[in-house]
Image (cartoon, rainbow, N blue to C red):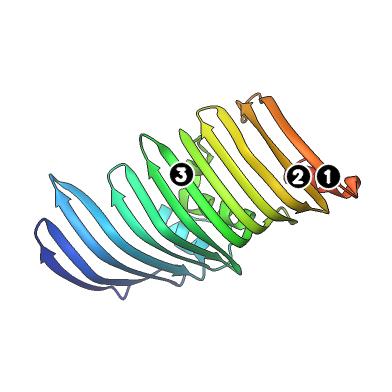
């Protein structure tokens, strides 16, 4: 609704000066950039700004099916490149409620996904639910490959607050390599580790080396159990 388009023709495509639209979920979309056509293949390079007060309603419209989950307001801006088999978002800014993250996202059919995020505070549950809202059943499929780098001043998972978090993980087929795991404060404990796990969604096996320094080990153990879903 309320779609506004201002564009100019250019050799091989269009220059999109302005695209604005109001979407379901009390959402607003703004975009600008270049739309190119080569051998019947469309490519887009530009900037995108999306804000939704009711993301679940927007996700339902996007997926053309009812979505019953709820999520806090979301805002996203990025320099976006779209081509067949590839999505790249640089200078990414993501806001979910009071949490803000910045970074990049790159996905291709051949190489899988690479994600880098840095945040003062990150509500991981909210980000995970956001991905599931828009991806639906695709979110439950095993990725062919995933490389994740995450740094957060505070990260909230299942109501547990971890401070000074740094994580580096690579997933390939049925193998998960935890290259870096460091937490400066988890219920008063410092945590560092690395390892590798095979078949994590089936019959997990592998090794995970952890170093834990805690003045109150009982509280730290409870926090770890909650993070692992064992609480």
Q: In this view, does 83 lie to the left or right of 130?
A: left
Give the mark, 3 or 1, whose residue is nearer the N terminus: 3
Residue occupied by mark 3: 114
Which residue corresponds to the image point at 59% horizontal and 32% vertical from the top-left?
177
Rounded to the nearest angstrom, the CA distance separating label 3 from label 2 is: 25 Å
Give the mark, 2 or 1, whose residue is nearer the N terminus: 2
Which residue corresponds to the image point at 27% horizontal and 44% vertical from the top-left?
84
Q: In this view, does 154 lie to the left or right of 13?
A: right
Camera-side mark, 3 or 1: 1
| Residue 139 x/y as whole percent | 51, 43
* Image marks 2 and 1: residues in contact by CB distance under 8 Å: yes
Which residue corresponds to the image point at 60% horizontal and 36% vertical from the top-left?
179
Label 2 crowd (10 A; few <14 / some 14-19 / many >=20):
some
Label 3 crowd (10 A; few <14 / some 14-19 / many >=20):
some
Residue occupied by mark 2: 191
When asked about the image quadrant of residue 21, the answer is: bottom left
| Residue 199 x/y as whole percent | 60, 26
Rounded to the nearest angstrom, the CA distance separating label 3 from label 1 is: 31 Å
Label 1 crowd (10 A; few <14 / some 14-19 / many >=20):
some
Rounded to the nearest angstrom, the CA distance separating label 2 from label 1 is: 7 Å
Which of these two is toward me, 147 or 108? Answer: 147
Residue occupied by mark 1: 213
Q: In this view, does 110 lie to the left or right of 215?
A: left
Kindly tell me whether residue 64 is visible in this rendering: no
Kindly tell me whether residue 33 is visible in this rendering: yes
Give the mark, 3 or 2, whose residue is nearer the N terminus: 3
**Tag 2's secondary structure?**
strand
**Tag 3's secondary structure?**
strand
Which of these two is toward me, 118 or 8? Answer: 118
Q: Which residue lies furthest to the left in this view?
A: 11
Which residue corresponds to the image point at 80% horizontal and 41% vertical from the top-left?
212
């Amino acid at each position: 609704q309320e779609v506004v388009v201002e564009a100019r023709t250019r050799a091989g495509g269009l220059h999109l000066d302005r695209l604005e639209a109001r979407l379901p979920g009390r959402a607003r979309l703004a975009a600008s950039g270049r739309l190119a056509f080569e051998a019947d293949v469309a490519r887009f390079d530009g900037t995108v700004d999306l804000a939704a007060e009711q993301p679940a309603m927007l996700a339902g419209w996007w997926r053309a099916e009812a979505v019953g989950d709820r999520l806090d307001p979301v805002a996203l801006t990025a320099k976006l490149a779209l081509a067949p088999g590839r999505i790249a978002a640089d200078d990414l800014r993501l806001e979910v409620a009071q949490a803000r993250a910045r970074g990049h996202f790159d996905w291709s059919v051949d190489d899988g996904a690479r994600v880098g995020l840095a945040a003062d505070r990150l509500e991981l549950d909210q980000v995970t639910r956001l991905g599931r809202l828009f991806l639906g059943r695709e979110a439950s499929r095993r990725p062919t490959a995933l490389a994740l780098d995450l740094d957060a001043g505070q990260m909230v998972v299942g109501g547990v607050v971890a401070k000074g978090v740094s994580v580096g993980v690579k997933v390939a087929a049925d193998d998960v390599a935890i290259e870096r795991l460091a937490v400066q404060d988890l219920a008063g404990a410092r945590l560092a580790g690395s390892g590798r796990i095979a078949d994590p969604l089936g019959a997990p096996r592998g090794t995970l080396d952890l170093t834990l320094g805690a003045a109150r080990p009982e509280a730290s153990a409870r926090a770890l159990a909650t993070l692992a879903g064992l609480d």
